[in-house]
Image (spheres, rainbow, N blue to C red):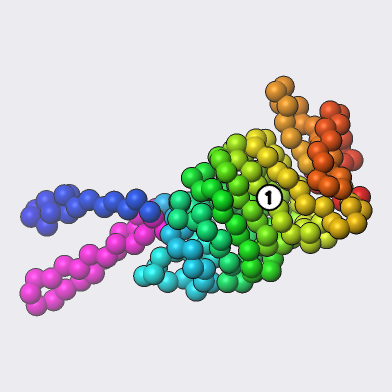
Amino acid sequence: ARVQDVFQRITYRNDTPAGDATILFTLSDGTASTTAGVTVNSDTIYVTTVTDTSVVDLTNGVSLSEAVAIAAADTTGSQTLVLTGAFSVPVNLAGSLSINESLTLDTANVGGMSISGGTTITLGSGTTLRIKHESGSLTINSTLAGTGSLRKEGGGTLALGSVSNEANMSGGITVPAGTLPVVPAADGAWEYYVEYKTGDQHPRYMRVERQGTWLVDGQPARRDRPRVEHG
């Protein structure tokens, strides 16, 4: 009864969780001991360090690449990676990232951040990388690739800085809010068709030509036109 009384009064709090956490309890009678674990489930992973590494080691914080790896190991739920105000400095990825599940990257409280290095961020088939960015700018200079899609939410600006995106990414880009400037190839020989939503919620598309000019066609999205088309 005393042991039960003690355990009923144990509380746990973590304001910056790194996904699921296992808390170990060891009980001893002075002669023998036994250990049991309790798992606290969380689909939120806080990215706490700008020094990126692909090796998961929670003793020195959680980097962006580590957060992606932690999310990949969690087979339940859909994970959200939260970046704080400390990320108003450039982040250089330790290596290429492969995202094979739908994730949310919450950068709502970060302004002036850029993600570079790592060569390529590959979005797997059927996945959506949802970026929530409320104000300021977020620039992804790493090349986006794969057949997965990108969704930009919030009133901030998301800039895709790699001219190699056109050749490597075939998935859709959806922009229900905010700004998505697109950097064209040097010869301006391609166009992006980006889906957006009007007040009546009907999907339409924008055409981006050389010099990054947005031309709103105001026409309903056609079934024969993918969300992003390279012409």
Tell me, yes or no, whether the highlighted magenta stretch contains residue 174.
Answer: no
Give the magenta range.
17-41
**Residue bearing the label numbered 1:** 159
- Horizontal and vertical percent for residue 137? 60, 47
The chief SS type of the magenta part is: strand
For residue 221, side relative to residue 2 (left or right): right
Q: Residues within 10 Å of mark 1 (few under 14, many from 20)?
A: some
- Horizontal and vertical percent for residue 108? 52, 44
For image coordinates 65% across by 47% down, the residue present is: 158
Q: Quadrant of residue 215?
A: top right
Q: Nearer the viewer, residue 56 or 155?
A: 155
For image coordinates 20% across by 68% down, the residue present is: 26
Reply above or below: 71 against 77: below
For image coordinates 57% across by 43% down, the residue present is: 136
Tell me, yes or no, whether the highlighted magenta stretch contains residue 23.
Answer: yes
- Residue at the outermost top position: 200
Question: Is residue 60 at all visible to an observer of this figure?
Answer: yes
For residue 177, side relative to residue 34 (left or right): right
For residue 75, side relative to residue 189 (left or right): left
Reply above or below: 154 against 120: above
Check disc 1 and give the amino acid type: Ala
Q: Nearer the viewer, residue 78 or 65?
A: 65
Q: Quadrant of residue 18?
A: bottom left
Reply above or below: 185 against 199: below
Reply above or below: 111 against 70: above
Q: Nearer the viewer, residue 142 or 185?
A: 185
Q: How many marks?
A: 1
- Horizontal and vertical percent for residue 119? 69, 69
For image coordinates 86% across by 37% down, the residue present is: 223
